[in-house]
Amino acid sequence: MSTATVEKETTGTPDGGSAASHKISVTFRLRRFNPEVSAEVTWQDFRIDIDPKERVLDALHQIKWEEDGTLTFRRSCAHGICGSDAMRINGRNRLACKTLIKDLNPAKPITVEPIKGLTVLKDLVVDMEPFFQAYRDVMPFLITSGNEPTRERRQSSEDRERFDDTTKCILCAACTSSCPVFWNDGQYFGPAAIVNAHRFIFDSRDEGGEQRLEILNEKEGVWRCRTTFNCSEACPRGIEVTKAIQEVKRAIITRRF
């Protein structure tokens, strides 16, 4: 196991203090995998000096830019909107861009590894295609009949509120990859796909609810859910994922939505 160390900076701060005085030494234990080099998974420690108010994503940037350019991970907006930097941090699914180092007990090594249930391509990057295929399979778009309208399709505030919670999904896969059923059976649609089906099933303007319910009533649909609440706990947007799944189950039974 190799260790990399960064020397403390001595640049000044606007209040006349030293930037280094705000930093602490933190060990990041990263799961490494490069199929072009070896089929074996290894763990590598990097000890860096960083402000504890920084995010895990900032630490990964520092490691990649200053210590090991081969480190591979996904990120885009860095503001909790794109969902691309979901990973397991200290054993929990989180967004690296929304997780502050000071909230992770930095006195101990902070472990970072890829989300579970999806094939690891390299380091912290997984193959998201099965996840997105399940998303596409539930038809996550408005289905209507008749001619194209000449004005927007209006609905009441109450109708909009009915599915407001599930519009917050950013497709980060944190919920799906926290699900034990998904870990053991990659055929399960998973929480994220069901959440995005919910968003349209309960939309008063949509006419494809019956089709989606039939899809989710199949063997690998909502009935595989074991209500462990892992998905709700993992969601970085606070969506009540388990509640949404239960509402879809109820709609399948009652055909009321």
Image (cartoon, rainbow, N blue to C red):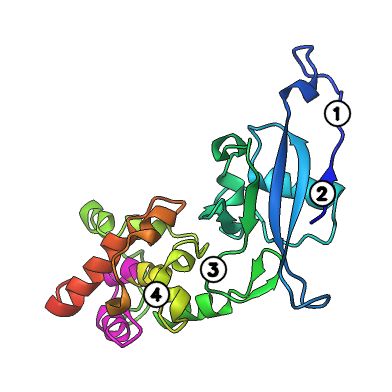
The residue that mark 1 highlights is 9
One can see residue 232 in this view: yes
Q: Is residue 205 above or below residue 22?
A: below
Q: Which of marks 2 and 4 is in front?
A: 2
Q: Is residue 21 above or below residue 238?
A: above
| Residue 133 image position (x, y, % from top left) | 50, 81
Residue at the image point whose x is 47% and y is 51% from the top: 236
Residue at the image point whose x is 79% and y is 49% from the top: 63
- Residue 82 placement: quadrant: bottom right
Residue in front for this viewpoint, 117 or 149: 117
The residue that mark 4 highlights is 181
Find residue 116 and name its label: 3
For marks 3 and 2, the one nearer the N-term is: 2
Q: What stretch is highlighted in magenta?
A: 198-221
- Residue 25 placement: quadrant: top right
For marks 2 and 4, the one nearer the N-term is: 2
> Could you say whether the residue bearing mark 3 is in a helix, strand or loop?
loop
